[in-house]
Amino acid sequence: MDVTPVGRPKKERDGKPVLTRESIVATAFRMADEHGVEPLSMRKLAAEMGVGAMSIYHYVADRDALMDALADEVAAEIDLERPAGPWTDAARHLAISTHEALIRHPWSIPLWTEAWPGPHRFAAMEALLDILANADLPHAVADLGFHALTNHIQGFARQRVAYGQNPTDTPEAQARIEAVLADPRYPHIAQHARYHHEHHGQVDEFTYVLDLILDGLARSS
Amino acid sequence: MDVTPVGRPKKERDGKPVLTRESIVATAFRMADEHGVEPLSMRKLAAEMGVGAMSIYHYVADRDALMDALADEVAAEIDLERPAGPWTDAARHLAISTHEALIRHPWSIPLWTEAWPGPHRFAAMEALLDILANADLPHAVADLGFHALTNHIQGFARQRVAYGQNPTDTPEAQARIEAVLADPRYPHIAQHARYHHEHHGQVDEFTYVLDLILDGLARSS
DNA sequence: ACCAGTTGTAGTACGCTGTACGAGGATCGT
DNA sequence: ACGATCCTCGTACAGCGTACTACAACTGGT
């Protein structure tokens, strides 16, 4: 039944090994895109690749290391190209690109806080710091701007995903939401939710607050 | 050996039951403060209370429900008192109080994104929305301000904790940091870290960016 | 051609997790 | 006294990450 009994690397027909660090990360990435990162176990990953569970550990130290790699794979999708024009345009472009990468792979958002950054994320951080360093801002302002922007990017992605992914399909969850909206103690929350429901997608909140921050920084120069 | 063999509620000497939903949450809260929330298992919690593991499930649906309760317990520490003065002062006070509660209990930060809010957190949300609703802001600006502030509060807490808690004590982690700081590809990151190291605690970055947001919102009225 | 050393794969097992199920003692209302 | 009810908890199961170990297959030296 089994073609490659045990021992040496399984190979494809053309001689490419089926098990490499790249192929492992790529498969895990695909599985994370499909079902999220929490139910992704080493056993399932190995099974998906048609391989024994422990074989993976030859290419990846442990599960955490795999998660680090996954997070950096998302960071690899950030467009580091710097558009011509003022520094605020460059910062806006980088911020939006990062935000979109996170939204594309929502499972990676918690990892960005927990994991040690990989080379791609370091590159993105360096790019943002470079933009700010060449913006003629006071040193303190540039430093604060870095944190404010990083925080805004990651936080808004987190918030956007959290609002959208709460499973509203189960009847009990629906009832829980209804209960809050009808609760007389929370009139503003109900109104806020109603407002969101009506104006859904009409305002890009991310870029609005982004410009709020960028304008504030620019004014501080 | 065992005083209360099995069956009925264990009681203290003065007749108070040892096992209530409140006592369970309180114990879990204390344990989370000590070692974080991740290694807090139902078994350990039960053992800490001198009780069988399954007894807890009579007061708490499952582990997730316990986590929801813990997150809301942190929200209970938010000071909802509204100081006199302009709305920006009220918003600042609420934001700082929330931020401080999160910093006091860093383990709860991820829960705030994942968990369904409890009554205390709803009350805090309502309070912030109330402040913004009475600020004479355009509706859209108030709505954006809510997200911007919420995001800033939670995100900065997350960032501050993440920067501080990375275990820098193990020699390998130290080496990893040194490697990045010495990497010629990341000159700005190294400079940024150096700047932080030198000016540590001299600038309150949280309130600085907070005022950036509040001023921006106030200008939009 | 042979053998030794290296490399990559995987079986087994350990300790841990959350929790479903059901047994059974303790207490209360009658 | 006697069911009904409430609470406690032992057992068990499925799943997890991964340490350890055995071993097949390839590689290079001779």
Image (cartoon, coloured by chain):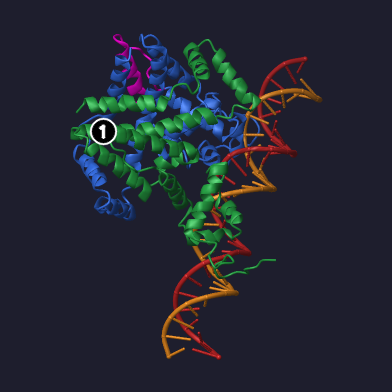
Chain colours: A green, B blue, C red, D orange
Residue B112 makes an appearance in the image: no
Q: Residue furthest front?
A: A84
**Position of residue A36 in the picture relative to residue A3 (left or right):** left
Q: Chain of mark 1?
A: A
Q: How many marks?
A: 1
**Position of residue A153 in the picture relative to residue B86 (left or right):** right
Q: Nearer the viewer, residue A140 or B28?
A: A140
Question: Where's the C terminus of chain A, which quadrant?
Answer: top left
> Label 1's element?
loop
Instruction: For label 1, count other residues whose C-alpha is less than 10 Å away and answer few (under 14), some (14-19) or many (20+).
Output: few
Q: Nearer the viewer, residue B39 or B141?
A: B141
**Position of residue A137 in the picture relative to residue B126 (left or right):** left
Q: Residue under label 1, please give it.
A: A86
Image coordinates for residue A163, horizontal then vertical, percent:
50, 27
| Depicted B148 relative to depicted A10: above or below | above
Magenta segment boundaries in residue numbering? B77-100
- Residue drawn at the location 27% of the way across and 51% of the way down: B185
